[in-house]
């Protein structure tokens, strides 16, 4: 049976030594996040993930969710008790303001807990994860009445939340949506339409489900300019906060999916359901994008979580599986064969996954820290710089971490040989579960187009310039440090590749937009590789410092070896990406559609 151990020690190292979050004690919530509090939160969150969520992962996948004849949905055995433990621990409101029942701690801590949950049990962790996204949207765009009505119960975990965008004919192009909203004359609206692929749309974990739904008010402009956002509860809420009558929203069916079987992915029918406008009329995407951006970052965390749990199980198997002898002579002469971890290609595979995981974890925490700064800092310049970095990194976190997370799950499965293809070992579940992260919240090709079409040119390319300057400054500041040479010297040509790619696109994409489309995914991964390389340089700096202090010498040395491996064998991929970008779109677009 597969197992999972939350990477608490590595996360503490990143927060305390690499990112040094204590530097931000002047920001709201950070002064409460003392080293002792951070360690206690991560230890308890890791225990919840490893001991309560993880044991239900395989059984939840095998059992799946069941829709009853009355439209209600039963989650797998044990999910309700595990969800209750999650809610009772206050994890839902870890970074939510205290006025709504949260703890007000930094979002970066919540991100770490999200990774633990995603690695332990992706399907189950999605229920609270979606709720947190809905809470974020209501915090920013909800009226005071909506906040006081819904947020305390959602933060408590008594109610959950969802996001309803996709329709049968309409995926990414939301301007095509048909769900309509008709004013009732009392401030509410009547919503009619069908939404598909709605994660956690109906279940038995909470007493109410708060749906955030985009729809078009009668007479609204066509396209995305006429979209509004509504809050539509499963049960209407009385003035005293108690639950009233059932709303006209129901689960028509459950999707039969490749993975995340323990999460109820629903077709939701709105048959004149009562809802209330969130934010301004016809400006629903502004409000929904708060939740979507939260979700995109959370999905990147899911990609990392699946990569981590797949790696842990692959390593455990590689240490025990006996097959062949080491090329340099027997390493276990007392046994019939050596464990496969002695073989260079097995090690190459495992090192690639682990090197990605550790840098990817640094990336998600760094991005979450920028989110905290952007939302909590009183310094306008600091806030703007963080917003630039957050915007630039959102498609990278979502696209790169989920592409690589899935690929790593497949590579980890390969370590098991034929056993990896057998369900009881659990590796196929990691592959199946990881696959959805590349698709939902905007398929990864869309993330790449968002990067190249919106994030790169925004404000005259300021965000990219800020990033390039930050990395170049880091290289310069540590260029004379001999111990840092293996980590900063390879970073310079990679950064040059990124600059060259951006320059080529500036010169060739505006006159020929297909060049941008053809090179978008390569640019996203090129930038992602440079960011991961930058994270490894920062990790190495912190590891060298701890090693010099005589602290955790063996663990720090392992990090330095991993960092060198990344710089030598993974970072040079930037030159391949640059060559692809410079190839342009000519051959990509040359064939007529009928020739495919």
Image (spheres, helix red, strand yellow):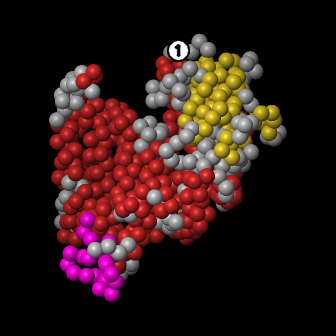
Establish if 272 lies above or below 417. above
Q: Quadrant of residue 78?
A: bottom right
Answer with left or right where residue 89 lies relative to residue 199. right
Task: Identify the residue at horizontal 73%, vertical 19% (top origin).
Answer: 184
- Furthest-top residue in view? 219
Q: Quadrant of residue 337?
A: bottom left
User: From where the camera sits, is residue 536 visible?
Assistant: no
Query: Foreground residue, 332 or 471?
Result: 332
> Percent position (x, y) of residue 379?
45, 47
Task: Identify the residue at horizontal 42%, vertical 57% (top origin).
Answer: 421
> Percent position (x, y) of residue 459?
34, 33
Q: Which range is magenta?
A: 325-345
* The magenta stretch spans residue 340: yes
Establish if 524 lies above or below 416. above
Query: Foreground residue, 421 or 454?
Result: 421
Task: Identify the residue at horizontal 56%, vertical 65% (top origin).
Answer: 50
Answer with left or right where residue 263 lies relative to residue 119. right
Query: Foreground residue, 346 or 51?
Result: 346
What secondary structure is the magenta-colored segment mainly?
loop
* The magenta stretch spans residue 317: no
Using a 10 Å C-alpha cutoff, classify the residue at mark 1 as few (fewer than 14 neighbours), some (14 to 19) or many (20 or more): few
User: From where the camera sits, is residue 167 visible?
Assistant: yes
Instruction: Look at the numbered disc 1 and give the secondary structure of its residue.
Output: loop
Which residue does the numbered mark 1 point to in the structure image? 221
Answer with left or right where residue 173 lies relative to residue 531. right
> Percent position (x, y) of residue 587?
18, 30
Establish if 522 lies above or below 546. above
Answer with left or right where residue 155 lies relative to residue 371. right
Instruction: Locate the C terminus by quadrant.
Output: top left
């Amino acid at each position: 049976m597969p197992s999972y151990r939350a990477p608490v020690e590595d996360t503490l190292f990143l927060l305390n030594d690499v990112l040094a979050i204590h530097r931000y004690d002047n920001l709201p919530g950070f002064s409460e996040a003392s080293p002792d509090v951070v360690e206690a939160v991560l230890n308890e969150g890791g225990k919840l993930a490893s001991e309560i969520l993880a044991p239900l992962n395989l059984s939840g996948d095998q059992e799946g969710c069941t829709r009853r004849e009355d439209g209600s949905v039963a989650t797998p055995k044990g999910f309700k008790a595990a969800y209750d433990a999650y809610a009772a621990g206050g994890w839902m409101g870890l970074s939510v303001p205290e006025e709504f029942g949260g703890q007000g701690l930094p979002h970066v801590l919540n991100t770490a807990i999200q990774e633990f949950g995603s690695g332990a049990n992706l399907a189950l962790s999605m229920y609270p994860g979606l709720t947190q996204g809905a809470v974020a949207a209501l915090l920013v765009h909800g009226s005071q009445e909506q906040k006081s009505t819904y947020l305390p119960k959602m933060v408590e975990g008594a109610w959950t939340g969802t996001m309803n965008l996709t329709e049968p004919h309409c995926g990414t192009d939301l301007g095509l949506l048909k769900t309509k909203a008709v004013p009732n004359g009392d401030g509410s609206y009547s919503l009619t339409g069908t939404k598909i692929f709605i994660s956690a749309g109906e279940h038995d974990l909470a007493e109410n489900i708060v749906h955030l739904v985009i729809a078009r008010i009668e007479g609204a402009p066509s396209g995305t300019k006429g979209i509004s956002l509504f809050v539509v509860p499963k049960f209407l809420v009385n003035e005293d906060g108690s639950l009233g009558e059932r709303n006209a929203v129901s689960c028509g069916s459950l999707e039969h999916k490749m993975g995340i079987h323990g999460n109820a992915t629903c077709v939701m029918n709105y048959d004149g359901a009562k809802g209330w406008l969130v934010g301004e009329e016809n400006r629903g995407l502004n409000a929904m994008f708060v939740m979507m951006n939260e979700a995109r970052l959370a999905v990147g965390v899911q990609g990392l979580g699946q990569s981590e749990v797949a790696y842990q199980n692959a390593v455990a198997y590689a240490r025990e599986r006996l097959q062949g002898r080491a090329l340099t002579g027997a390493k276990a002469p007392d046994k019939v064969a050596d464990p496969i971890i002695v073989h260079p290609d097995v090690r190459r595979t495992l090192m690639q996954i682990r090197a990605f995981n550790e840098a990817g974890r640094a990336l998600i925490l760094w991005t979450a820290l920028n989110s905290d700064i952007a939302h909590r800092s009183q310094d306008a310049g600091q806030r703007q710089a963080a917003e630039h970095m957050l915007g630039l990194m959102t498609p990278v976190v979502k696209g790169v971490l989920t592409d690589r997370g899935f690929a790593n799950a497949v590579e980890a499965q390969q370590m098991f040989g034929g056993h990896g293809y057998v369900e009881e070992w659990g590796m196929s579940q990691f592959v199946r579960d990881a696959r959805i992260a590349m698709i939902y919240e905007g398929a990864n090709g869309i993330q790449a187009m968002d990067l190249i079409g919106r994030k790169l040119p925004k404000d005259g390319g300021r965000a990219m310039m800020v990033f390039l300057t930050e990395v170049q400054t880091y290289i310069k500041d540590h260029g004379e440090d001999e111990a840092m040479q293996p980590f900063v010297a390879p970073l310079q040509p990679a950064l040059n590749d990124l600059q060259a790619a951006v320059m080529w696109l500036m010169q060739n994409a505006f006159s020929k937009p297909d060049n941008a489309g053809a090179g978008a995914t390569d640019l996203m991964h090129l930038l992602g590789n440079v960011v991961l390389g930058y994270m490894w340089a920062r990790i190495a700096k912190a590891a060298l410092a701890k090693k010099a202090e005589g602290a955790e010498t063996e663990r720090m040395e392992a990090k330095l070896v991993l960092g060198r491996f990344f710089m030598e064998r993974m970072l040079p991929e930037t030159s391949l990406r640059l060559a692809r970008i410079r190839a342009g779109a000519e051959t990509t677009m040359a064939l007529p559609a009928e020739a495919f």
